[in-house]
Image: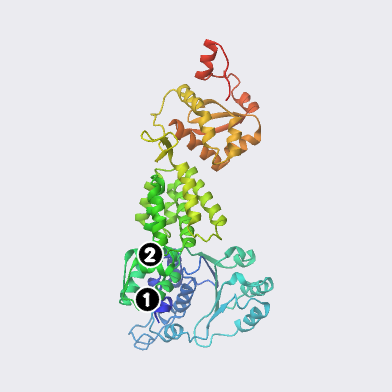
Amino acid sequence: MTATLYRKYRPQTFSEVIGQRHVVQTLKSAVKSGRIGQAYLFAGPRGTGKTSLARIFAKTINCAANLETEFPSGNSPLGNSVSKWKKSGEPCLKCDSCKTIADNRALDIIEIDAASNTGVDNIRELRETVNLPPSALKRKVYIIDEVHMLSGGAFNALLKTLEEPPAHVIFILATTEVHKIPETILSRVQRFDFTRLTIEEIINRLKEIAKLEKVSVDREALEIIAVHSEGGMRNAESLLGQIIALEDKRITTKEVEFLIGTVSEKELSDFVEMMVSGNVSGAFGKIGALREAGIDFKNFGKSLLNYLRQMLVLKINPELGKKLSYELTKERLEKMKKQLEAVETSDILRFISTLQENIEKFKSSPIPQLFLEVSLAKTIRTLTKVQPSSNEKPDSVETKPPKKIEKSPSENPDEDLNLVLSRWPDIIDALKDYNHSLSSVLKMSQPMLIEGKYLILRTKYSFYNDKITDGQNRLTIEEAIDRMTGVSLKLKALTEKDFEDQYPDFKEKKSLLQEAVDIFGGKIVEE
């Protein structure tokens, strides 16, 4: 019984629905106003409540408490001594209609799985029965799940019915892939987009279910289940049911980690913390501890990639943190923001790329954690600044967290430009690991001037400009300049011709090195 918690605790009224407030309010308002449409489309990820809400809506529009019917005093379906019912927008759960629908005995509520009934014949059969009046309820409701699975011919047949539906019929179409539905169908339905549930919404609901099932579950264990469910309440309830089925009245974090084959967000967060702080031995020690705990490294690698993806999203735009509410708790979100202070976008991109590459390269390795150890070793080298140790030989090194040169904003653009010019070879060299071709393009480009917050680069060809100003490349170069010089600048690239057109009176400034050569004679020799 506990293995089907999502059926046992399926919401029966609008007020019991978790999330989807915008959908719930609109449907309730439609019931209260009596403005019921004849075709609806519920679109969204799996397990977010589409079919549950479809059933509640079907129940509500057939509920005696919401029908435009007058009853003699004392003879109402609800046993109340009033002559006319005021629409509540909720099913009463007491009248014959509500009870029949709740028990799945209502012949006028027809549920069709389009994944199994994809053909034209199935929809033709529907068209033949759709004109028949309801057998017991006021309205006949067709709920077609996974409607995007219908064939082209079936969609055409359905379209004919949607164009002129009988007054007593309502269609509710549900889909996880709305882009596969023809525009002709979309134009004839009221569309509602369902969103993933937040971590907190799922955790709170799981707490309620655990209490009703008289089971104690660690908060962190609930977090793991919520994250693993990917925003779907049905997935979370199903997973909790499988765990409760083990007849353990006290469910711990370790048990859930073992059963799912993954680790908690805290474990991931701690591992990333060691990476960004340059704690190499700690990170490798953590890998060893995970191996001893019998963790599934494939799942860990997937979880780590997702964690890094979340970091990347937040680094590019902190405002997008709101969009990650179905993936992260508030506490984890704040921890991640602090970690981001120690890394640049290019660092995150590099580790994602390295990790992805090594997962593929070592997928057949007899050592399951090898892909992670190799990725860590490669990335730590770029995340940390290597310096000779005073107590060891020159070829022995110790790793320290990266530090950029701190420099107060200058009011003198010439001073900032000279600093950029002096570090330009280092900036180019630093970008080799990220993108060798980009590094080569920069070598053929020249910083000319600083105008406001922009560093103007002069390039030889227009395709150089395209390479430099490509979204991620530009951000990476800007971060490299910021790290090497402490000067925060935006990048703008112009071809030689465009530069001359925009700055006809520009007199090229010489670098400090070139000025010294001019004064003392000689020439600059490239190594």
Residue at the front extreme, as displayed: 393
Identify the residue shown where x is 62% and y is 23%.
500
Question: Which numbered disc covers residue 244?
Answer: 1
Q: Residue at x 49, y 48 (%)?
A: 351
Please say if 255 is above or below 409.
Answer: below
Considering every residue shown, the one lying at the far right of the view is 153
- Can residue 255 be seen in this snapshot? yes
- Above or below, 380 relative to 63: above
Q: In the rendering, at what x and y percent does residue 524 appear?
A: 57, 19
From this view, report whether residue 484 is shown above or below residue 115: above
Q: Where residue 525 appears, x then y in whole percent?
A: 58, 20
Q: Is residue 176 or residue 443 the one in the foreground?
A: 443
Q: Is residue 206 left or right of residue 509?
A: left
* Residue sitting at x 47%, y 69%: 47
**Circle 1: residue type:** Ile
Q: Name the residue nearer the viewer: 323 or 350.
A: 350
* Residue at the disc numbered 2: 201
Give the mark count. 2
Between the C-alphas of marks 1 and 2, the distance is 20 Å
Q: Secondary structure at mark 1?
A: helix
The residue closer to the viewer here, 160 or 70, is 160
Q: Quadrant of the C terminus?
A: top right
